Amino acid sequence: MRAANQIVAGVLQELQTMAAPGVATADLDAAVEARVLAAGATPAFKGYRGYPASLCASINDEVVHGIPSPRELVQGDIVSLDVGVLLEGFYGDSALTVAVGEISDEAETLLRVTEEALELGIAEVRVGSRVSDIGHAVQRHVEAQGLSVVREFVGHGIGSKLHEEPQIPNYGEPGRGPRLAEGMVLAIEPMVNVGKPAVRVLDDGWTAVTRDGSLSAHFEHTVAVTADGPEVLTRRSSDVSAVAAGSAAPAS
Ligand code: MF3
Ligand code: CO
């Protein structure tokens, strides 16, 4: 799982620099597929319940599961980039939201708070804590900043399937749900809206958008529960949050 997830981390790090004005999300998708195959892995999303691409690219009011298209990114956009791979029977899954050129203060705050919420959720991961401790930490931080947490999509266990038990909501009371045990691996993925939490799915059957048209961000890490606390398997070398959150990166 370390190997699968580090392929995902490397791909996302590359996408971070590629996502610029004039680049189509279909071009990013092609880059993801080429890079994943070159690494000896398989894109996990392509063909999953009929999903047509290797990347989910969700722009501005799109929350998750945006389908790559010839639409070009423009200065001021934010775009969530979500990548999954399968390597030797095990899955990796991670997402981040990037700024395309200069973005508004509102968008900057949204990205910062969503990533902070993910790190606060990760900080709850230890042997013996409960699944809902994660979502509680996420929700508390997001709502304290006047933003809202999406309810319709949740994080998940991950391993020899992309989606395993338990579901990991990004909201709720602490102290509920299964206890975390050593060796469990969790994909934690807060989705945060500037406006109200409600979302709807477009006629393409995939793209989730905010009902009120407000901006939305999404960050996701795959995290192992170890005796020493959380091990973030999708940590990027470019990522400075690791130090701030005190969570270990995987040995490579
Ligand atoms: N990271 C998302 C998830 O874990 C992406 C799934 S896209 C799909 O649910 F196409 F595979 F459904
Ligand atoms: Co996921």
Image (spheres, rainbow, N blue to C red):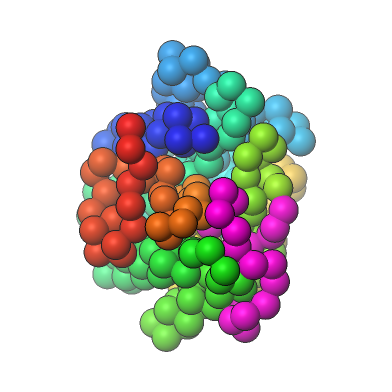
Say whether residue 39 is left or right of residue 76.
right
The residue depicted at 29 percent of the width and 56 percent of the height is: 242
Residue 25, x across and y down, in percent:
46, 34
Q: Which segment is the magenta one?
A: 165-188
Could you tell me how many numbered marks the image carries?
Answer: 0
**135 or 230: nearer the eye?**
230
**Observer able to see residue 94:** yes
Residue 9, x across and y down, in percent:
39, 37
Rendered view: 235 above or below 152:
above
The residue depicted at 47 percent of the width and 53 percent of the height is: 226
Residue 48, x across and y down, in percent:
71, 33
Residue 249 lies in the magenta stretch:
no
**237 or 26: nearer the eye?**
237
The residue depicted at 59 percent of the width and 21 percent of the height is: 88
User: Image quarter for residue 159?
Assistant: top right
- In which quadrant of the rendered image does the C terminus lie? top left
User: Image quarter for residue 62?
Assistant: bottom right
**Observer able to see residue 135:** no
Rendered view: 20 above or below 148:
above
Rendered view: 214 above or below 78:
below
The residue depicted at 70 percent of the width and 27 percent of the height is: 47
User: Image quarter for residue 170?
Assistant: bottom right
Say whether residue 34 is left or right of residue 239.
right
| Residue lying farthest to the front in this orientation | 227
Residue 184 lies in the magenta stretch:
yes
Judged by its main secondary structure, the magenta piece is loop
Residue 206, x across and y down, in percent:
69, 45
